[in-house]
Image (spheres, rainbow, N blue to C red):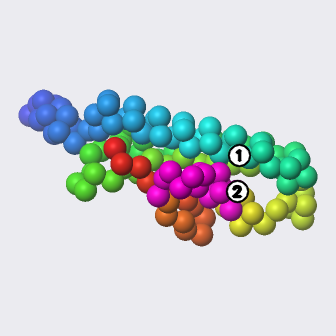
Amino acid sequence: MANTHHLFQHYNSAIRLTDERRITLMRFRDSLRTRMITNFMKLPADQRRQLEMHFQTQGSFIMDTIIKPAIENFDLDDGVYFHGNQSPEERPEPKVFHDWVINAIDKDNEYEKITKQRSVAGIVEL
């Protein structure tokens, strides 16, 4: 049987995201998380409704399968979750959560953003 492991290693090193890019993405992610938490805590208590904000990195980054894109746009999926004890009837509509996230990351318009119905993409130049 042919041993092609060295060929895969060569190919993988050519497409793998560099450690420098990974660190930059993590710093950007952490900056957005800090901004969201800080701005969420500035909301009046009645708007926070005893909710807690939790994050979970998802997708190719966390699975260590992220690669160098052809056009230098990196996609790091970071889910934000609002946990609480409210019944579905007492919870805010999903749009309220979506708007909180947009407002939190849009402070000073530092980041370009792409807003979709269920997600927000913060764009940063690497």
Q: Nearer the viewer, residue 34 or 66?
A: 34
Direction from residue 83 to residue 70 in the image, left or right: left
Comparing 109 with 15, the one in front is 109
Element class at badge 1: helix
- Identify the image quadrant of residue 100: bottom right
14 or 116, which is in the foreground?
Answer: 116
Residue linked to disc 2: 100
Secondary structure type for disc 2: helix
At x 46% / y 35%, what residue is drawn? Answer: 26
* Vertical placement of residue 72 versus 24, above or below: below
Q: Is residue 8 visible?
A: no
Residue 36 percent coordinates (x, y): 65, 45
Task: Give the x, y percent position of residue 8.
Answer: 17, 36
Q: Is residue 57 magenta?
A: no
- x and y, in percent, of residue 5 in the image: 16, 31
Q: Image point 44% across, 54% down: which residue?
A: 123
Numbered disc in front, either 2 or 1? 1
The segment highlighted magenta reads 99-112
User: In the image shown, does 114 or 111 lie closer to the viewer?
Assistant: 111
Q: Hey, what amino acid is under mark 1?
A: Asn
Mark 2, Cα crowd under 10 Å, few <14 / some 14-19 / many 20+, is some
Magenta span contains residue 104? yes
Q: Dot 1 corresponds to which residue?
A: 39
Residue 85 picture location, percent across and down: 88, 48
Amino acid under label 2?
Answer: Trp
